[in-house]
Amino acid sequence: MPAAISPATPCSSTAVATSTDRRGLLTSATDVARELDPDRSVWAELRRLIPPLYVPIAMMTLGVGIILPIVPLYLEDTGVGLTAVGVVMGAFGVGAALVGIPASSFAERRTNDHLLLIAIAAAATSVVLFGLTELAVLLVLARFVAGSGFGAVGQSRQLFITRGVPIRFRGRVNSGMGGTHRLALVIGPVLGGAVAEAVSFRAAFVLAGVVMAVGAVFWILPGGREDQRIVDAAPPVAVRASLRRHRGRVARGGVGPMLIQAGREGRYVIIPLVADRLGLSVAEIGGLLAVGTVIDFVVFPISGVIMDRFGRLYSIVPAFTVMAIGLVMLGLADDATDVAIASVLIGAGNGVTSGAVLTLGADLAPEGEEGPYLAGFTLVSNLGLFLGPLVVGAVADVAGLDVSAFVLGGILLAGVAWIALVIGETGRRPPNPTPDEARQARSA
């Protein structure tokens, strides 16, 4: 069995050496963030992060939530089969996964804020275009670009947190980002389902694109851009060279979250399709998704407290197990009540892990090379965003929606096992290097 991965560690890298030369002492963007205000409270930290972090995430996720219940139904309305639905839905995940390395390179050449601005524009435009076509190739392309934009937004904000938020706040800040995500997903599906039923599918897609574009307001809000002192303390890093140095850490750190993301993303496909099979309307399906997300939102503050005070695994293991049980119950559902109960369990399990994947990535990122590591981590973990919908569609075509739900639950449990046994606890151990990094440090 591979050794558990240690948390983020300073390493003998070009990036850290460059930072040492520029400031005359061993430092990094994370060190500068600690120096800016070492005594601030968690509440002050959360307020500070509203313009640069929570506003863009809220608008982007609200746009995604608006189209969440209608994309599978819109695709079925165009006459494509369930496997094709899975492929189109999964293109979002492919885009989110593959954008990591080019997004990191762009952020190193320009700035993290420029990456966020361009990502918002790409996602908003592609969502509108998705609702204006029925051609399969264009549908896949639009979903791919939307996923790329969404993934780049997430990576940009994850890098922002890793550089600028002290580790003692990181679980609660990421949990707050997860809570913002969940609140948007409470409102979005209800709004999207209502607009699609009252007006049209196309109107819902246009609305989603406009809402996403509003996220760009961070650029003009006070405190919306990244602190220049942190930017100056994070000199450019050679992305590919950094990924080669940390390829083992990226692989071991990303596989478990990839399986988790597959289960999470797959539920957005399986719940609407099971509900549609049972005869629910588009608006009712939107409401059903919102019920699970309400529970998700109510319990999300627990996640950050557990992760920061007790450890990451105390949140991840029990909560994702509950979510897997909900997916199994969904496969056994015979009526709308059964689907609602399963949705509540899925929402509760997902809520208590709010920000867990983001926190794992931040914990494991080596200081001075956060951007490249997070790009690799995102590439691996976000493959689950593609695999989840693809598994749902392919298994449903062959064996039925019930078996598809069972398989999704099994994938989720496999991800839990990987995180517990291979990655291990990342929030409570001293920052010791991995064996590979120790050898590199000795030979440097």
Image (spheres, rainbow, N blue to C red):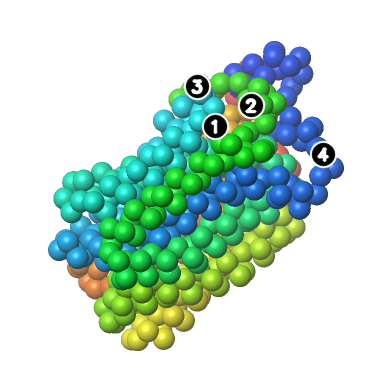
For the residue marked with disc 4, what is the amino acid?
A: Pro
Q: Residue at x 81, y 44 (%)?
A: 40
Above/below status of 351 relative to 35: below
Cα separation between marks 1 and 3: 9 Å
Three-letter amino acid code at the position of disc 3: Arg
The amino acid type found where label 2 is placed reads Val
Q: Which residue is mark 2?
A: 231
The answer to whether 176 appears left or right of 56 in the picture is: right
Residue at mark 3: 109
Q: Earlier in the sequence, mark 1 or mark 2?
A: 1
Crowding at mark 4 (Cα within 10 Å: few <14, some 14-19, many 20+): few
**Amino acid type assigned to the residue bearing label 1 in the image:** Asn
* Of the image marks 4 and 2, the number of the one nearer the N terminus: 4
Q: Position of residue 64 (x, y in %)?
A: 41, 55
Disc 1 marks which residue?
112
Nearer the N terminus, badge 1 or badge 4?
Answer: 4
Local SS, label 4: loop
Measured Cα–Cα span from mark 3 to mark 4: 29 Å
View extreme (right): residue: 39
Q: Secondary structure beneath disc 1?
A: helix
As measured in the structure, the alpha-carbon distance from the residue carrying label 2 to the one carrying label 3 is 12 Å
